Amino acid sequence: MTYMKTFFLLFFILTSSLVAKVEWCNSFNIYDDAKQSEKLVMVMLSRKGCPGCAYMYGVVFEDKEVDELLKEGFLSVKIDVDEDFLPENLEYFATPTFYFLDKNEKILKRLNGGKHINEFIKILKELKKSKVEE
C-alpha cells in the first residue's frame, strides 16, 4: 500500500511540474515593466462565475505553447471587473475581454470572449510578429 501512495505522490509532483502557469503581473507598474522588457501587455478583464473566463484559465492558459508565448512576449494582467480598478480606456460588454497594448498604452488589439487554444496561439504569434516588425 505504501508503494501505491509513493507512486501517486510522485505522479502528482511530476504532472504538476508539467502544467503551464501564466505569470500574472501587478497592474500598477505594468507599463514601467513593459518599457524595460520591451514586451507587449495583455490585459484580461474577467469576473467570477464567467464560463469563458473559466475556460481560458482552465484550458487555454494551461497549454504549454500559450504559456511559452505569453512568457516570451507579453506581460499579463488580469482585472476582475467587479472587484478591481478598471482603467477608463478599457471597456467591456462581457467577459472575458482581452486588450493587447504596447508599452505606451496604445491598444493594438481587443478580443471579446474566450478563444480556443489554436486561435489564441495564432493571435499571440501575430501580435508578437507585428511587435518585431515595428
Image (cartoon, rainbow, N blue to C red):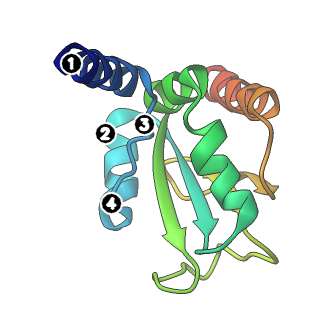
Cα–Cα span, label 3 and label 2:
23 Å
* Tag in front: 4 or 3: 3
For disc 2, the marked residue is: 36
Q: How crowded is the residue under tag 4: few (<14 C-alpha within 10 Å), some, or many (20+)?
A: few
Type of the residue with mark 4: Asn
- Outermost residue on the left side: it is 2
Q: How crowded is the residue under tag 1: few (<14 C-alpha within 10 Å), some, or many (20+)?
A: few
Q: Identify which residue is drawn at 26% across, 17% down.
A: 10
Q: Identify which residue is drawn at 62% across, 68% down.
A: 46
For disc 4, the marked residue is: 26
Cα–Cα span, label 1 and label 3:
25 Å
Does label 4 or label 3 sit earlier along the sequence? 3
Task: Tell me the quarter of the image containing the N terminus.
Answer: top left
Horizontal side of 126 relative to 48 (left or right) equals right
Q: Secondary structure at mark 1?
A: helix
Q: Position of residue 15 (x, y in %)?
A: 40, 21
Residue nearer the viewer, 6 or 48: 6
Quadrant in which residue 110 is drawn? bottom right
Residue nearer the viewer, 75 or 101: 75
* Tag in front: 3 or 2: 3
Q: Position of residue 121 (x, y in %)?
A: 71, 27
Cα–Cα span, label 1 and label 4:
38 Å
* Tag in front: 2 or 4: 4
Q: How crowded is the residue under tag 3: few (<14 C-alpha within 10 Å), some, or many (20+)?
A: some
Does label 3 or label 2 sit earlier along the sequence? 3
Q: Secondary structure at mark 4?
A: loop
Type of the residue with mark 2: Gln
For disc 1, the marked residue is: 6
- Kindly tell me whether residue 101 is visible in this rendering: no
